Amino acid sequence: MEKWKVANLKPGMKFSKPVYFDGDNLFAPENVPLKEKDLNRLSKWGVEEVESDGTLLSDEVPVDDQAASNFFEQPFRSPEQQEIVAQYSGLVSRLKELHEQIRSGSGVSSEISDSIVDGLLSLVDKRRNDILQFVLYGLHGEAGLVENALNSVVLSSLVGKNLNMPKHKLLHLSTSALLHDVGMLRLSNEISEKKGALTKDELKVVRTHPIHSYKIITRELKYPEEVGLAALQHQERWDGNGYPRGLSGGSIIVPARVIAVVDSFEAMVSRRPYRSSMIGYTAMRHILSDNSRRFDPEILKVFIRTMGIYPIGSIVLLNNSCIARVIENNSEAPLKPKIKVMINEKGLEYTEDDGEVIDLFSNREFFIARAVDPKERAQKAEA
């Protein structure tokens, strides 16, 4: 193979054969123009040379493929995905009804919460990957308690299954996840919906919400003690620096440890009044850096095995400049999931979600260069 200095390559150059770097890592397919962003990426990685059996064909400037803002803003395009949106929206309405009952303190019934949990567990059983993608992007637009509660049920139930919880324990965990923050409904709107920093006195009030949740769950909704305890303890920390009782380690029941992890992850990937959401990969990196401060290390391992380093639904850039969506994780090789191409190396958009599926574990030609934030790409496309 002939070698080419990266410093001598220019955007728009095309080769008659594929271009590689660091051995067998594909940089550009044959007859596909090189792009400035990809050349910059090689420079950042410290790659000085690429090689190819081909010859230089042209130096035409490629067409920018970033005019895809609507595509990234609306990843739920297939009929199956739209069905998920419709079902989730129905559960949102039911949960709002329950929250209103709790807020007013009249006519509270566990019938609604039971039906919501049953509906979510059914979706998880039948449409696991689609519902995980939906959780990651929160496209239903219900920020705050509603979104957090529904998404926490989905994530907690998946972790619970990987912990081999029996069915009744899984139901208890899922119900706790749905109701863990309902105590916030008994706080004033000025505090619970405040966008800025809380004062010390306001923070003390917020830290009473697990106690309110416990009372609502056990006294008003009449759920078993374990369901209430998981909500009471979900803000406790593995190192003992949590609240309301400062419990640590094994003193915290397992369901509360699970909810602590999924609640933190969900908060990071969802929109909030006071900050923007993180992409799934970045959120996972934050979770991984915990170092046994907040989370049970064993529960954390199960969560990572459940979600993957690139959670399902993550948008990623491949080494050949394709944009793809993660559709299935590989527990044995978390950096090599199965992906579906959304925009190919030539800039073609698969608007019907019918792009090529690639298993990065078995196909060593491709790898993930980095995670992509859809919002950032949309903003660049509109600029």
Image (tube, rainbow, N blue to C red):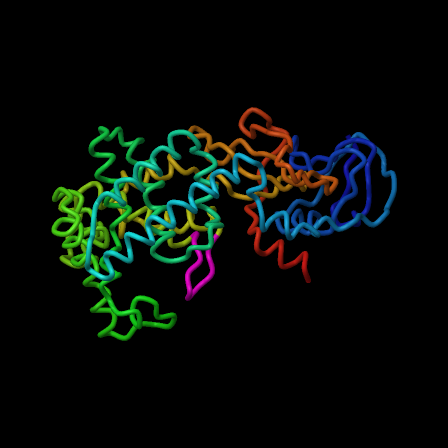
- Which corner quadrant of the image does residue 192 belong to? bottom left
Instruction: Pick whichever, 173 or 319, lies toward us.
Output: 173
Residue at coordinates 64% horizontally, 53% vertically from top-left? 69
Residue 301 picture quarter: top left
Judged left or right of residue 252, residue 3 is right
Residue extending farthest to the front is 107
Q: Which residues are magenta?
A: 269-278
Where is residue 2 drawn, in percent x and y? 79, 33
User: Residue 196, relative to residue 351: is it above or below?
Assistant: below
**80 relative position to 207: left or right:** right
Task: Report x, y in % for residue 294.
Answer: 27, 52
Quadrant in the picture for the N terminus: top right
The picture places residue 170, in percent across and down from the top left corner, at: 25, 34
Q: Residue furthest top?
A: 362
Residue sitting at x 68%, y 37%? 21
Q: Is residue 54 visible?
A: yes
Tell me if residue 241 can be seen. Answer: no
Quadrant, the C terminus: bottom right
Residue 276 part of the magenta segment: yes
Q: Residue at x 25, y 51 (%)?
A: 180
Q: What predominant SS class does the magenta segment belong to?
A: loop
Most foreground residue, 233 or 172:
172
Tell me, yes or no, whether the highlighted magenta stretch contains residue 155: no
